[in-house]
Amino acid sequence: MTPQHELLTWYRQVGRTLPWRQTREPYRILVSEVMLQQTQVARVIPYFARFMELFPDERALAQADTDSIHRAWKGLGYPSRVERLRAACQAVLIRGSWPDTPEKLQELPGIGPYTAHAVACFAFGRAVPVVDTNVARVYARRDGLALPLDRTGIWAHVATQVDPGEPIPYNNALMDLGATVCTARNPLCGKCPWAARCISRQQPAVIAATANPLKVASVKVTYGATLSDRRLPRQHIVLALIHHDQRYLIARRKDDAHVGGLWELPGGKREAGEDDRIAIAREVREEIGGEILSARALLTFHHAYPDRYLTFHVYRCRLFNPLEVRPLASQELRWVTPAEFVSMPFPPANTAIQERMRAYHRGLISRAG
């Protein structure tokens, strides 16, 4: 029995039933693939159903206004994804039809190699590789591929394995295998259809090293104080780094407040029972009258006092109607450039944010200087 036959036999028995696997429409396939970027399947399913009700085809999405698409997308994160999705649909209408190869699909705005290959396979039945982290992990372990994986090399390797007669179920099976059996940690090797072929089976060091084989190693930079005495109480603060049109929103503390006159980010204490996103949505509403469109974790750091620690959770945020904010709890609001942001007088507890932004915008700030 060939490896392809083994995998397909397993898939027909235990493969996941997902709504986007019931269609060959390129629009629906594309929407699902964009939603699934950095978002878990279970979370995507209800969003996909609602999105299809609101925007059932590429014409409906292409003609939709920005506010409506963001409200439909709200909660999935990375809102620029839906803007790129709409742009791709607009381009399809101009072309008059959907391209059906990875090369042609990448001519659409915002469509990269992975998404292009996925649409070419799942919508048009092209026998092309579709390589995400799960798929790369499966082959790195099964075939004992050298680490770190070469991204071009893994695509070429997977291309030689695709079943030419059944590329759609084969690629779906690979994704299911990586997501449910050959998982990042504690893989279920006893349930794997390729267990007898796997070079890395029962090699804990290799399994650990291949948990995320496409991840690029980076040096972690620590900002703020170190938690040297964990017996001290901690207070959690959420802060919104709100950006719009290449500028950031900062608020000046009232003159009669502690460290009055200094600048800071909108935000405040996380209340009991709140998670970060609920807290930051509340703080933004209370302090500037804004509504969060998206919030993406950027930085967590600590500031030490003799009797406690403050732990700051900074989120990079976008708002609905960002130009309608107003200073409900501060002296003044101001939109500033990155260079202005890092030079403004912030309270000592907040200077780690400026350090992080100085590193984030290093090139832009140096040119402005």
Image: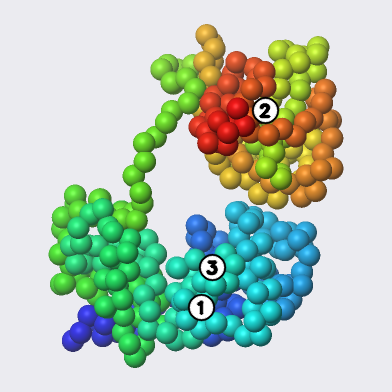
Tag shown at residue 340:
2
Nearest the camera: 153 or 191? 153
- In the picture of the structure, the residue carrying the numbered disc 3 is 111
Q: Quadrant of the C terminus?
A: top right
What residue do we see at 31% from left, 80% from top? Answer: 162
Identify which amino acid the numbered label 1 is placed on.
Lys
- Which image quarter is the N terminus in? bottom left
Q: Is residue 219 something one can see in this rendering?
A: yes
**SS class of the residue under badge 1?**
helix
| Residue at the (44%, 21%) spot, across then down | 227
Which one is earlier in the sequence, the residue at label 1 or at label 3? 1
State the CA–CA distance, disc 1 to disc 3.
Answer: 10 Å
Q: How would you rate the neighbour count of disc 1 (Cα within 10 Å): few for under 14, some for 14-19, many for 20 or more?
A: few
Mark 3 to mark 2 CA distance (whole Å): 34 Å
Secondary structure, mark 3, is loop
Q: Amino acid at mark 2?
A: Glu
Q: Which residue is mark 1?
A: 104
Q: Position of residue 54 (x, y in %)?
A: 73, 72
Q: Are marks 2 and 1 in contact (CB under 8 Å)?
A: no
Disc 2/disc 1 C-alpha distance (Å): 42 Å
Mark 1 or mark 3, whichever is nearer to me: 1
Residue that extends furthest to the top in the rendered view of this protein: 306
Q: Find residue 354 and report its horizontal and vertical position in percent.
A: 58, 26
Q: Are marks 1 and 3 in contact (CB under 8 Å)?
A: no
Q: Which residue type carries mark 3?
A: Ile
Q: Earlier in the sequence, mark 3 or mark 2?
A: 3
| Residue 48, visible in the rendered structure | no
* Circle 3/circle 2 CB separation < 8 Å: no
Residue 236 sits above or below residue 209 on the image: above
Coordinates of residue 363 in the picture (x, y in percent): 53, 36
